[in-house]
Image (cartoon, rainbow, N blue to C red):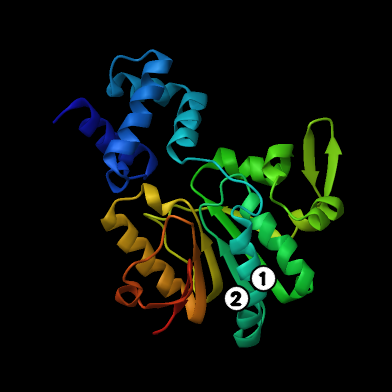
Amino acid sequence: MNDYAIFVKKFYIKSGIDLNLYKEAQMKRRMVALREKKGYASFLEYLKAMDTNRELYEEFLDRMTINVSEFYRNPIRWQQLEEDILPHLIRTSQGKLRVWSAACSTGEEPYSLAMLLSKHLAPSQFSIMATDLDDVVIEKAKQGKYHERALIDLPEEFQKRYFTRRGDDYFISDEIKQLVTFKKHNLLADVYERNFDLIVCRNVLIYFTEEAKEKVYTSFQRALRPGGMLFVGGTEQIFQPKRYGYAMKQSFFYEKIDG
């Protein structure tokens, strides 16, 4: 067994994260670059250093989980969500609208959802759960501090109403922050909650193996209520949705069709 393979096995024991479920070429390339930047000759040497250096371990997790996000990423999809998908979900929901922003990174996506839902519903009419496997980005998300570039696609009405500028940074209002509940969750290992009306997971599954994607698609389907929707990223179309119990409602929006 080579150095990287042993590292993957031991890292799983340490973290509960199975790197075998990520595309090896992409993952290994990023890991080699980071290991060499830090000056370690082997992955096992790198892992040993992580055992005694929490910052090194957290930096590794941050690089591994591809924490790149913006508010209203791909605005046309958010327009579809507001004009076509959301009215359907509100109409067919059995009570409070339950939304899950999975692999939420530093919070731009769940806060975008909170702003959008607040435009159409009272806070008592919806809940948003946001999850990620990286503790560091969850803490950043809770702070609600962003650079101007993260807001480039956000509608102006939301920028004016919900953000305060201090120097080069923008701080999201407590009014929106309190609408999102952040939790740690590993999509490839942890139990999924049930009965969501909408699950948003975008630009994450492209890094997973086909086996891992199938597992997540199936788990999301079970987590949705009948008629609930899965919203995926612009490079993540599901080519055989019926195989997982979905029907394509619109491009990148998939409706749960069986129990």
- Marks 1 and 2, how far apart in space? 6 Å
Residue 160 locus on image (x, y percent): 86, 51
Considering only vertical position in the picture, is 67 above or below 218? above
**Label 1: which secondary element:** helix
Q: Amino acid at mark 2?
A: Ile
Whether residue 214 sits left or right of residue 38 in the image: it is left
**Callout 2 secondary element:** helix
The answer to whether any part of residue 147 appears in the image is no
Report if the CB atoms under discs 1 and 2 are less than 8 Å apart: yes
Question: Which residue position is annotated with label 1?
Answer: 82
Drawn side of residue 124 relative to residue 44, left or right: right
Taking the spot 65% from the left edge, 66% from the top edge, the residue there is 79
Residue 149 at least partly seen: yes
Query: Which residue has dot 2 on it?
Result: 85
Query: Residue at left 37%, top 54%?
Result: 188
Q: Is residue 244 left or right of residue 186?
A: left
Residue drawn at (74%, 61%), measured in percent from left and top? 115
Q: Which residue is at the far left?
A: 1
- Residue 192, how many percent across, how many down? 45, 65
Amino acid carrying label 1: it is Glu
